[in-house]
């Protein structure tokens, strides 16, 4: 029996509060599982990089690390990684810089200017996405040979100095800018180039960071193109080859040294992971401001 004079407490508001947080809990669980699925391949590579050579093919495999750090020392001594990193830095930075310049110029031209043949040029640029790059690798090799740029930085930078993705992202951003900014600048005697340099480019900082990050990662992870265009070098004499070609050298005709390949993959992937973690907020902000959200 209820005590006389005691207020009756209803449990319905409490149940409602609990049910209100159920969707958030489910969302958190699903996102956590999704994060584990995406992180597990990298965790598996780390595990393999720490396995002794005589335990590579153990079954069932262990999900706990064995802490065999000798694999990292062996993999580092197997190639001239300092030169590989230097080559990669030169190629990635120059490719990213040139892509940003061409993307800004082309994106602003398509978004704000009217000129003859604009629609045709725009269509030709985006129809280039239809052709897979691997289909053109042999004709491109013949052209590079005829121009005499094989085994150079040039053949790894110039063909990627302009990208459809960067043009499209900057086009969307410039198209969304208020026209009043250009009207006010024109009344003050500002030219197109001055407006682009002083107004449009500073406002597009997050979008430029997003494009630059995409291009940098794509150039850093490139394997097929430099492998074909820079043949004739070895592990101790990388020449102009980037880092992915150095990692590929652990795959040989007599088999793959999985423990060394995984160790090399870890210490060559770690720099780009750190860069992405530092710039992830700017990356998301650039996507949102580019007009691609939703």
Image (cartoon, rainbow, N blue to C red):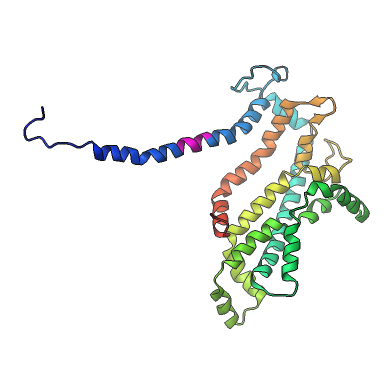
Magenta range is: 28-33
Q: Between residue 72 and residue 46, name the one nearer to us.
A: 46
Q: Name the residue furthest right.
A: 146
- Does residue 280 appear left or right of residue 51 in this picture? left
- Does residue 278 appear left or right of residue 215 in this picture? left
263 versus 21 height, above or below? above
- Does residue 143 appear left or right of residue 115 in this picture? right
Q: Percent position (x, y) of residue 25? A: 41, 37
Q: Between residue 27 and residue 54, name the one nearer to us.
A: 27
Query: Where, by quadrant of the figure, is residue 49 drawn?
Result: top right
82 versus 70 height, above or below? below
Residue 34 is covered by the magenta coloring: no
Residue 241 visible? The answer is: no
Query: Where, by quadrant of the figure, is residue 116 drawn?
Result: bottom right
- Dominant secondary structure, magenta: helix
- Does residue 135 appear left or right of residue 59 in this picture? right
Residue 41 visible? The answer is: yes
Please report the residue visible at 75 percent of the width from the left and 46 percent of the height from the top: 88
Q: Percent position (x, y) of residue 81? A: 76, 38
Q: Percent position (x, y) of residue 70? A: 70, 24
């Amino acid at each position: 029996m209820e005590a006389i004079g005691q207020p009756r407490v209803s449990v319905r508001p409490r149940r409602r509060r609990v049910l209100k947080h159920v969707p958030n809990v489910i969302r958190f669980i699903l996102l956590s599982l999704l994060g584990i699925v995406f992180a597990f391949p990298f965790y598996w590579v780390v595990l393999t990089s720490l396995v002794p050579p005589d335990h590579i093919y153990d079954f069932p495999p262990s999900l706990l690390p064995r802490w065999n750090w000798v694999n990292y020392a062996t993999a580092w001594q197997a190639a001239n990684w300092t030169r590989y990193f230097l080559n990669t830095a030169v190629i990635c930075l120059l490719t990213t810089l040139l892509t940003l310049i061409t993307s800004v110029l082309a994106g602003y031209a398509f978004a704000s200017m009217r000129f003859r043949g604009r629609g045709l040029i725009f269509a030709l640029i985006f129809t280039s996405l239809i052709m897979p790059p691997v289909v053109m690798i042999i004709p491109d090799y013949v052209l590079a040979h005829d121009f005499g740029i094989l085994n150079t930085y040039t053949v790894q930078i110039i063909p990627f100095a302009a990208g459809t993705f960067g043009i499209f992202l900057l086009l969307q951003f410039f198209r969304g800018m208020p026209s009043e900014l250009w009207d006010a600048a024109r009344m003050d005697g500002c030219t197109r180039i001055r407006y682009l340099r002083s107004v449009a480019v500073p406002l597009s900082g997050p979008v430029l960071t997003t494009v630059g990050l995409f291009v940098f990662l794509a150039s850093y992870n490139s394997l097929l193109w430099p492998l074909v265009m820079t043949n004739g070098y070895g592990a101790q004499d990388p020449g102009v080859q980037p880092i992915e070609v150095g990692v590929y050298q652990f795959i040989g005709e007599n088999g793959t040294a999985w423990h060394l390949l995984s160790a090399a993959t870890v210490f060559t992937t770690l720099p780009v992971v750190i860069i992405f973690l530092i710039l992830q907020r700017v990356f998301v902000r650039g996507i949102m401001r580019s007009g691609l959200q939703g």
